[in-house]
Image (spheres, rainbow, N blue to C red):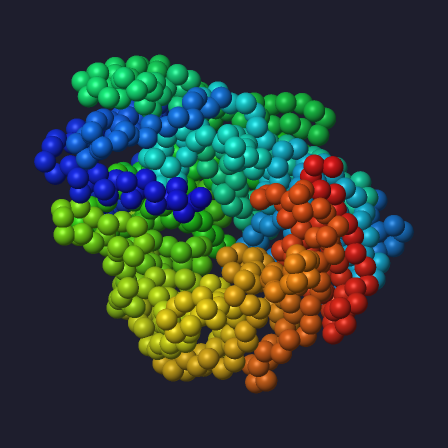
């Protein structure tokens, strides 16, 4: 469904371009040019902020409504498809702290010292898990004594959390529905140009409340966690980072159209069969909509938040217009806000800092000192020879209570994920795939996958004259393919692209003005995650495929690459896992990939469906697979911690798209391995993984 949404309307736009050369297109908004000198500009005051928001909303509304005008490509041969959805309405140790494990794993963070949020947090003695609407607090060491110390209800639908062991604080994010007025739009690219989203029948409200709740919890006493503060901020959760006691929460918010705004005239067959009447109705609707947009107050577009103290006192959190920025380029409707929360603030009462950009969201990357937001250029319509661009916005986060805008830059192409960015010695390195829409020969374009030309490169940037200026770029890589994974390690870079084979490209980044590809290796399949083992080897996870890129022999694979000689990388070892139907969250979520350096162990979630004899459970597998990784001896299976029975324990008809009891995460401590799912936690000792020593069970969210 997501792919249909992403490409369906764009594909329709491409058809429209082809079929309407002979008539005027007043409905078709002109694409805005790419800004090579991108920047964010502050507002002079609240009046200019409101005017900018309303101008952007009115323009987007006109584009959506105008697209419903009658055109010859369908007239007489059918009717347009107007949206028929209607209007959206103690120390916790129990008398003596247990001995800590000698070593243990935590969240798989991209940058050392920058802690990333996840639904699992661990400090060796304590294991925290968010599942459904609850926080589960475990005493996890000694492993044989794994016990559930406390359960705490979390308002709304929990997203992720950050844990500060030194301050004994959890920062939990959850989505709640505050019943905000207006019709929320979807982001540019996820629906028809930002029209309202309609959730009826899709249960999308379960995880998409209109307000982000931030709950700060004191977990000094594990058996009795205490909420010290709650923040309610308009928007939805994107990402979070922590550096020492400074927490950065990145959230996005929709443009909320005023009640009464409609994006198509009310349907009747007579109206849609009369071109003149339909055109007149569209003209009138645009006038009515724009009046409603201009009449909505700034508070309707950007509502205030609130803070709730431990004693229940509620304090408003009004926004400041001086904290908002507008891009000088087209980057979609919406708001992206970086919230700065200082856990060392006295009494947990200091108002959080907020820095907002009037833009659609994008990829988030953070180093110890900087946070980057990468947002794609918004094209109204595909055109021949059009290419994608991304705007890079840098914020200084050295001050715990503030994110300060530094400057912006422009890079051609798009980024696969946060690992496509990395900051080293003041230089930002970016791995990007450049997509060019091809001419179909009829004066239009083809914009769906397969109708584009692609190439990839690495580009470097540095802060110069108040902006991010390009220092250098590599040669173009792998025409016709796109980046599936990237990783930067010190002065080295690694990029994996894919079409039919998996080329691993190695880069020498010692001269930022001349990022240089020095080696390449082709192997079947592709890697979606790259994990560095020092400067000599890469441990990767991905899929094995036929040489033609097909699915007939598909399986998951773990690979070990020798990159001691950058000019001649080698696939030292590879290990296939599962069948054509196998799956793992580690394919698309790096936090599910868990490597334990001191023990040389790798743990990844694994799911598969084998050939059963009519019994679903006979062929079903849900487990944590564990491997021993040695750069000399290779990749050796150690065993698996099965969670199949937790799946069976929860009836099939009670699963949902937002809660399923398959294995999702893991923790390792000394010789023990913990498998974690939405349904519970199980621990076993390596290499006796098939014999668990303890299990805790969670309640389904609909008990």
**Is residue 20 visible in the rendered structure shown here?**
yes
Tell me the quarter of the picture where residue 155 sits: top right
Farthest-out residue, right: 95
Whole-percent x, y for residue 702 in the image: 70, 36
The N terminus appears in which quarter of the rendering? top left
The C terminus appears in which quarter of the rendering? top right
Which residue is at a point 47% across and 26% down the rendered structure image? 319
In the image, residue 464 above or below residue 641: above
Which residue is at a point 53% across and 56% down the rendered structure image? 589
In the image, residue 204 above or below residue 319: below
Q: Nearer the viewer, residue 686 or 125?
A: 686
Which residue is at a point 80% across and 49% down the rendered structure image? 148
Tell me the quarter of the picture where residue 621 sits: bottom right
Which residue is at a point 54% across and 62% down the rendered structure image? 581
Farthest-out residue, left: 22
Q: Nearer the viewer, residue 497 or 431?
A: 497
**Is residue 167 visible in the rendered structure shown here?**
no
Whole-percent x, y for residue 532 in the image: 51, 70
Whole-percent x, y for residue 505 in the image: 37, 72
Whole-percent x, y for residue 615 in the image: 68, 58
Residue 4 placement, left or right of 542? left
Residue 358 placement, left or right of 303? left
Q: Nearer the viewer, residue 74 or 182?
A: 74
In the image, residue 298 above or below residue 405: above
Farthest-out residue, bottom: 632
């Amino acid at each position: 469904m997501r792919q249909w949404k992403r490409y369906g309307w764009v594909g329709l736009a491409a058809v429209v371009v082809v079929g309407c050369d002979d008539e005027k297109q007043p409905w078709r908004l002109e694409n805005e040019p790419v800004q090579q000198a991108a920047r964010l500009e502050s507002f002079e005051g609240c009046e200019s902020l409101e005017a900018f928001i309303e101008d952007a909303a009115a323009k987007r509304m006109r584009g959506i409504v105008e697209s419903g005008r009658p055109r010859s490509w369908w007239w007489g041969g059918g009717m347009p498809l107007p949206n028929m959805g209607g209007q959206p309405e103690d120390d916790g140790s129990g008398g003596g702290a247990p001995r800590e494990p000698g070593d243990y794993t935590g969240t798989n963070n991209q940058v050392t010292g920058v802690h990333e949020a996840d639904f699992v947090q661990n400090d060796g003695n304590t294991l925290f898990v968010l599942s459904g609407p609850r926080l589960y607090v475990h005493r996890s060491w000694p492993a044989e004594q794994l016990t559930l110390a406390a359960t705490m209800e979390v308002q709304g639908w929990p997203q992720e959390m950050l844990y500060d062991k030194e301050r004994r604080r959890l920062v939990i994010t959850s989505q709640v529905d505050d019943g905000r007025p207006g019709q929320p739009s979807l982001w540019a690219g996820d629906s028809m140009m930002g029209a309202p989203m309609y959730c009826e029948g899709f249960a999308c409200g379960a995880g998409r409340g209109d307000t982000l709740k931030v709950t700060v919890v004191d977990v000094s006493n594990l058996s009795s966690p205490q909420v010290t503060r709650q923040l309610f901020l308009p928007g939805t959760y994107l990402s979070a980072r922590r550096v020492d006691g400074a927490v950065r929460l990145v959230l996005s918010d929709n443009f909320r159209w005023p009640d009464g705004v409609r994006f198509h005239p009310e349907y009747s067959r007579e109206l849609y069969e009369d071109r003149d009447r339909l055109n007149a109705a569209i003209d009138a609707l645009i006038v009515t909509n724009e009046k409603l947009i201009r009449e909505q107050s700034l508070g309707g577009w950007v509502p205030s938040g609130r803070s709730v103290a431990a004693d229940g006192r509620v304090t408003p959190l009004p926004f400041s217009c001086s904290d908002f920025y507008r891009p000088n380029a087209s980057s979609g409707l919406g708001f992206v806000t970086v919230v700065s929360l200082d856990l060392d603030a006295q009494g947990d009462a200091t108002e959080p800092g907020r820095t907002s950009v009037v833009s659609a969201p994008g990829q988030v990357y953070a180093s110890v000192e900087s946070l980057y937001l990468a947002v794609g250029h918004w094209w109204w319509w595909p055109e021949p020879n059009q290419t994608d661009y991304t705007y890079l916005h840098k914020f200084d986060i050295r001050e715990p209570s503030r994110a300060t805008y530094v400057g912006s830059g422009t890079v051609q192409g798009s980024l696969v994920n946060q690992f496509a960015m990395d900051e080293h010695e003041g230089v930002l390195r970016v791995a990007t795939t450049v997509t060019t829409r091809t001419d179909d020969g009829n004066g239009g374009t083809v914009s769906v996958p397969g109708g584009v030309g692609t190439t990839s490169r690495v580009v470097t940037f540095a802060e110069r004259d108040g902006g991010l200026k390009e220092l250098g770029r590599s040669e173009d890589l792998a025409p016709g393919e796109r980046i599936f994974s990237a990783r930067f390690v010190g002065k080295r870079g690694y990029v994996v692209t894919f079409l039919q084979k998996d080329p691993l490209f190695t880069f020498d980044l010692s001269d930022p003005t001349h990022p240089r590809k020095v080696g390449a290796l082709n192997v079947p399949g592709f890697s979606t995650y790259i994990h560095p083992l020092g400067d000599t080897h890469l441990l990767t996870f991905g899929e094995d495929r036929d040489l033609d890129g097909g699915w007939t022999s598909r399986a998951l694979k773990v690979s070990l690459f020798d990159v001691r000689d950058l000019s001649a990388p080698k696939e030292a070892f590879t290990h296939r896992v599962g069948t054509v139907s196998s799956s793992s969250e580690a394919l698309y979520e790096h936090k599910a990939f868990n490597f334990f350096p001191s023990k040389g162990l790798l743990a990844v979630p694994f799911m598969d469906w084998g050939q059963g004899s009519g019994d679903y459970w006979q062929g079903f597998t849900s487990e944590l697979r564990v491997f021993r990784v040695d750069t000399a001896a290779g990749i050796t299976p150690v065993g698996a911690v099965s969670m199949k029975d937790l799946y069976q324990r929860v009836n099939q008809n009670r699963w949902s798209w937002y809660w399923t009891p398959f294995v999702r995460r893991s923790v390792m401590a000394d010789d023990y391995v913990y498998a974690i799912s939405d349904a519970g936690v199980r621990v076993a000792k390596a290499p006796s993984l098939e014999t668990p020593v303890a299990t805790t069970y969670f309640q389904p969210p609909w008990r």
